[in-house]
Amino acid sequence: MTAQAPPTPRSSGQAPAGAGRAAAGWSSRTRAAVARPWLLLAPALLVLAVLLLWPLVRVFLFSLQDYGLREITTGEPNWIGLRNYGEILTAPELWTVVLPNTVGFAVLSVAGTVAFGTAVAVLLASLGPFWRTVTSSAIMAAWAMPAVTGTYVWVWIFDADRGVFNDTLMNLGLLDDPTNWFTNRWTFYAIVLLNVIHHGFPFVAVTVLAGLLGVPKEMLEAAEMDGAGAFRRFFSIVVPQLRQVFAVVIILSTIWDFKVFAQVYLMPGGAGSNRSVLNLGVWSYVESFGQNRYGFGSAIAVLLTLLLLVITAVYVRTVLAEEER
Amino acid sequence: MNRTMRRSVAVTTGAVVLAASVAACGSGGEGGGESADSLSVWIMQGTNPDADAFFDEVATAFEEETGATLDVQFVEWGDAHDRFVTSIAGGTTPDVAETGTTWTPEFADAGALAPLDEYVSDAGVTDDLVEGLVEAGTYDEQLYGMPWYAGVRSLVYNTEMFEQAGVEAPTTWDELEDAAAALKEEFPDKVAVAVPGDAEFTVYPWVWGAGGEVATLDGDTWTSHLDSPESQEGIAFWTGLATEGGYSSTGATTWRETDVLDAFAAGDVGMAVMGSWTPGAIVEANADMEGRFAAVPIPGKDGGIAPSVLGGSHLSMFETAQDKDLAWAFLEMMTTGEFAQQWAEQSGYFPGQVSLLDETLASTDPLVAPFAEQFVDGGASVPAAPTYGAVQAKLTTSTMMQSILSGEQDVATASAAAAEEMTKILNGAG
C-alpha cells in the first residue's frame, strides 16, 4: 500500500493548474474547446473525405449518366436522369432470380455462420489452454485461406468427374452416375453456403469467445445453484450479456454475405453462364463492367449501399430499443 | 483473413484508383506528346517466353532503319483491358500496342485507333494478310488492327485410344459420331468427345460447318443467326454427342477450355476441339502424352473444313501517335517478313502474313500441319462488332450450351434465346 502513495501529491497538484486556466476568460476557452477536437480530427476527416466521400459522390454522379467507353474517351458527361435506376428496378431477372438468390443466401449464411461460430466459441470457452490453442489455430487456418483458394478447394471436392464427394457417394452405392452439382440452383448454393460458412465462422467464433470470457462467473454459478441447466444458463444469461457482440457480428456478416462475389463467380457456371444462380454481385459485374456500362453499375452500387444502410439501421434500432427496455 | 481481406481489397482498390489518376496526371502526354525520336509500344506478356531478347533485336534493327529508339512495355493480359481504357481516358495511350482481336473494334469505336488502310496498300501487303485476322481488325470498313499472329482451334485426338478402338481421324460428322461410339464402347469410363459448356469458340465451328452464321451486319444493324435452321442443326449435332450419344461427361457441362485441356492431358479424353497453342501445354502437364496425340482440321458436315475462330493479336496504331509514319515503320517491321516469322516460331503461333505460312504448311508434323491447314483454309472471325466483348462478358453462347447440356432447354428454345440476346447486345442495347 505504501508503494502506491507517491502518485497522490502529483494528482492533487494538478488541480490549481486547472483552476488557473479557468480564470483566462470564458468565450475564448469555449471556442478553443469546441474547435480542438475538430482540429485534431481534421487530418483523418480530410483523408476520409478524399478516399471515401469523393468516390461516393462520383459513383452517384456516374449513376445518373449513360457512362461507357466513349464517355471516358471524350470526357463528356451524358446525363440521362434516373433511367439507370428505372432499368434496374424493371429488370425481370432482378426480381425472379438475383434478389431471391442474394437475400435467401444472405439469410441462410448469416444464420449458419453465427450459429456455427457461436457453437465453436462455446466449445473453445470450455476447453483447457492447450486444446484451446490447438483448436483456435485450426480454425484460424480456415480464416486465413484466401477466398479464391478456398473456393477452388470446394469446387474440386464437388467436381463431377474427379471429386471426392461423387466418388464417395458412388463407392457407397448411393449414386449410379456422376452428377454435376453445379448446374442445379439449389445444390450450387448449398456448396457456396458451405464455402462461406466455413470461411466466415472463425471471425464469429473469436469475437463471441471474447464476449463469453467476459460473462461474470458468479452469475453462472448462481444460476446453477438455482437449478438452471446448461441450455437455460446459455440462453437466459450468456446470450443477453452478449447482445452487443451478436449485433456487431450479425451486421458485419449481413453486409459481407450480401456482397458475396468471388465465391459465386469462380464456381463452374457461376460467372453468368448459369443464369439461375446469378446473385447481386455477379449480376452487377456482368451487366456493368462486362458491358462497359459504368453508369448502370454505379446505379446498382448506390442501390446496394442504400439497401445495406437500411438493413443496418433497422437492426441497430431494434437492438438499441431492446437495450432501453 | 477472409473478412479483413475483403475490406483491404476495397481500400486497395480506392488507393489504386487514386494512384492511377495521380499517375495519369503526372505523366500526361507520355504517349504521343513526346518527340518523334522515340516510339512507345505496349506488348502483352507471356506470349513469347523469350520476348526480352526478341525486342532487343527489334530495337537495334529499328534504330538502324529509322534512327528512333524503341520503348517497349510489357502488359499483363489480365489487366490490359483496364489499362487501355484508363489510358484512353487520360490521353496517355502508347504509339503502338498489341490489341487482342476482339478489342480492336471496341477501341476503334471509341475513337482511339488510327486507320491503317493507306499504309497497308502503300506497302503492297493488302492481299498477303490472313483473312480471318483482317476481318476481325476491320471496323466500319476500315482496317484498324494489323494482323500480327494468331492461333486456331482444330480437332485434337488421342492417337492411342483411336488405334485401340480401331478408328481413323474423322473427316465428316457421320465419321465423327461413329468414332465417338467406337471410343465409348472401348473405353466406357473415358470421355469419347469433350463437349464443354463454357467454351464458346468450340461451338462456332459446328454452326459454320452446317452452313450457319453467328451474326451478320446489314447496314448498321447486327443480326444473330444462332437460331437459323442451319445453325440449330450444327448446335444440335455438337450437343447431341453429349445429350443423346452420352459420349461426353456430365462434368463437361460446366467445363472451360482449360478443363478440357486438363482432362485431355490426363489421357481421359478421346477427342476435343483445342487450340494450336495447346500441344506444348499438354506435354508439359503430362510428359507421357508426348507423341500420343494428333490433330485434324474440324470436319464440315459432309466433309471439307469447318471454319474455326482465329484467336490472336493485332498491332494497332493509336491516334495519339505523333509521328504516324514512324509508328507504321514499326508495324511493318513487326508484322511482315523476318521478325513476324521469328515471333511466330518462338511463340508457337502462326504469323498474320500468308506468304510466311508456306513453310509451315509444308510441315509434316501431325501437330503443326493440320492446324496450319485449318488456319489458312478454315480461319474465321467472331462478329467484328465493338460490342462483341459485351456478348462475351454476358456469356450468351455458354448460357445456351449449358442449358442444352444440362437438359433444361432444347436446342430450339436455347438458341432462340441466345440469338435474341446476342442481337440486342451487338446493337448496343444491352
Image (cartoon, coloured by chain):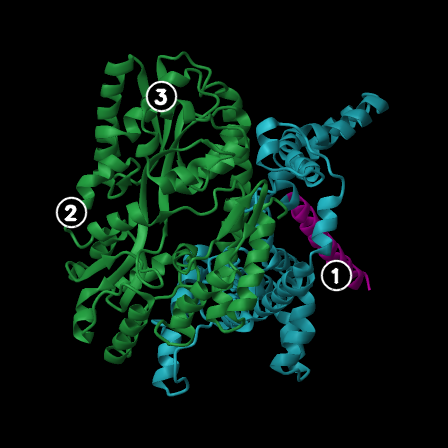
Chain colours: A cyan, B green
Circle 1 Cα neighbour tier, 10 Å, few/some/many (<14 / 14–19 / ≥20) = some
Q: Are marks 1 and 2 in contact (CB under 8 Å)?
A: no
Q: Please name the residue that numbered disc 3 is placed on.
A: B122
Give the alpha-carbon distance from disc 1 to disc 2, as whole Å.
76 Å
Q: Which amino acid does label 3 sit on?
A: Asp
Task: Indicate the secondary structure of the residue bearing disc 2.
Answer: loop
Circle 2 Cα neighbour tier, 10 Å, few/some/many (<14 / 14–19 / ≥20) = few
Q: Which amino acid does label 1 sit on?
A: Val
Quadrant of res A168: bottom left
> Is residue A117 visible in this depiction of the protein?
no
A211 vs B312, left or right, is right
Compared to B123, does B214 lie above or below? Answer: below
Magenta span: chief secondary structure: helix
Task: Indicate the secondary structure of the residue bearing disc 1.
Answer: helix
Numbered mark located on residue A319 in the image:
1
Viewer-closest of B305 and B263: B305
Which range of residues does the magenta coloring cover?
A298-325
State the residue at coordinates (56%, 67%): B413
Q: Is residue A319 magenta?
A: yes
State which chain disc 1 sits on.
A
**Discs 1 and 2 carry the same chain letter:** no
Circle nearer the N terminus (2, 3): 3
Q: Which of marks 1 and 3 is in front?
A: 3
State which chain disc 2 sits on.
B
Numbered mark located on residue B363 in the image:
2
Q: Which amino acid does label 2 sit on?
A: Ser
Q: In x, y percent, where is residue A36?
A: 72, 28
